[in-house]
Image: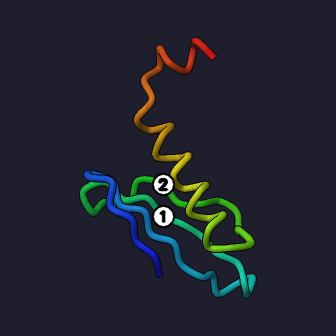
Amino acid sequence: MTETNLHPFTIEVAPLTSPKGKFGWAIRRNGKLLERSDRPHDSEDKAHSSALSAVERAFRSPADARRR
């Protein structure tokens, strides 16, 4: 399992039991589950990239989202 610390967020990437060979992620804020991946990823790197994108969305203000 891979963990990345982006205080107060923690990204956890781990292999899934089903389907085998795929990875999932979980984002925790101060240890509390905030979000979990809803689909399996082919590699640990792809799962981590997806989790980082989710953390960035959490940091982005609603005003930033409207400008895009």
Could you say where residue 65 lies in the image, as x and y percent from the top left? 55, 21
Residue type highlighted by circle 1: Ala
Could you say where residue 15 lies in the image, as x and y percent from the top left? 60, 82
Q: Residue at x 63, y 17 (%)?
A: 68
Q: How is the image coloured?
A: rainbow
Residue 57, compared with residue 4, is above or below; it is above
Residue 26, compared with residue 7, is above or below; it is below
Asked if marks 2 and 1 touch (Cβ < 8 Å), the reply is yes
Q: Residue at x 60, y 70 (%)?
A: 24
Q: Residue at x 74, y 72 (%)?
A: 42
Compared across the picture, whether 7 is left or right of 66 comes to: left
Could you say where residue 40 lies in the image, as x and y percent from the top left? 70, 69
Residue type highlighted by circle 2: Glu
Which label is found at residue 50? Answer: none
Compared across the picture, whether 8 is left or right of 40 comes to: left
Compared across the picture, whether 43 is left or right of 57 comes to: right
The residue that mark 1 highlights is 26
- At mark 2, the secondary structure is strand
The residue that mark 2 highlights is 35
Compared across the picture, whether 30 is left or right of 18 comes to: left
Q: How packed is label 1: few (under 14 Cα within 10 Å), some, or many (20 or more)?
A: many
